[in-house]
Image: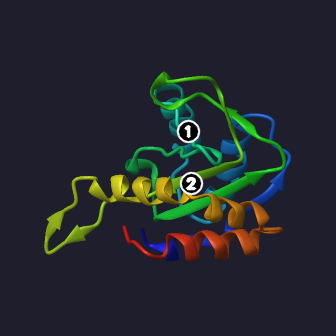
Amino acid sequence: MDATLFCEALTFCDCELGSSDDVFELLGRHLRAGGYVADTWLDAIRERERAYPTGLACQELGVAIPHADPCHIIKPYIAAVRPKTPVAFEPMAGMGDTVGARLIVNLGLKGHTEAGKEDDGAWQVEALQALMEIFMDADKVDEILACDDAAALCACMARLCGGSRV
C-alpha cells in the first residue's frame, strides 16, 4: 500500500459522529474541498455502503473500510477517521451483528498502470489485505488507539502501512 496516500488533512480524531452518514458527510466536505473526489462521491459511497456493507468486527478492533467506485475518484487518497465513540456500520457480507467501528479507513484508490497494462483491481485487494493484517495485530491496534490527534494518527497509519504498496 502506498503510505504516502495518507495525509493529515484527511485524518480525523475524536470527532462526534452519530452515524455512518455523518462520517461520509465529514469526509465528503474535505475530499471535495481538496479536489480528491467528484460531486457524485457522497451519493455513491452511501449507495455502495447500503449495497455492500463494510463493517468488520476484527478480534482487536471494530472497523469499517468504505469506498466508492473509482469513477468517483479524481486523485487517489486514503482517509482515516477515529470517532470519539464507535459508529455503527452494517457487517460485511451481512455476517454477524452491527459493528461498532472505532476506526474508519476510506480508500479512494484508482487502478494503476504497470508496464503499459491496466491493473484489474488487485491494488484494492492488496490494500484491504494490508489493512486487515494491521487490524488483527493487538500491538498495532494499541498504537492506533493511543494516537491523541490527527497528526499522530496519520503518521502512525502511514508507518504501519508503509511495508506494502498499492
Outermost residue on the left side: it is 116
Asked if 103 appears above or below 8 in the picture, the reply is above
Q: Residue at the spot x=76%, y=40% of the render?
A: 86
Assign a secondary structure to mark 1: strand
- Image coords of residue 54 (percent x, y): 52, 37
Q: Nearer the viewer, residue 41 or 57?
A: 57
Badge 1 crowding class, 10 Å Cα cut-off, few under 14, some 14 to 19, many 20 or more, is many
Disc 2: which residue: 135
Q: Residue at the spot x=55%, y=47% of the render?
A: 39
The answer to whether residue 16 is left or right of residue 59 is right
Q: Which mark is residue 150?
A: none
Sequence order check: which comes first, mark 1 or mark 2? Answer: 1
Q: Which quadrant is the N terminus positioned in?
A: bottom left
Look at label 2 and name its amino acid: Phe
CB atoms of marks 1 and 2 within 8 Å: yes
Q: Which mark is residue 56?
A: 1
- Image coords of residue 84 (percent x, y): 84, 49
Q: Nearer the viewer, residue 37 or 16?
A: 16
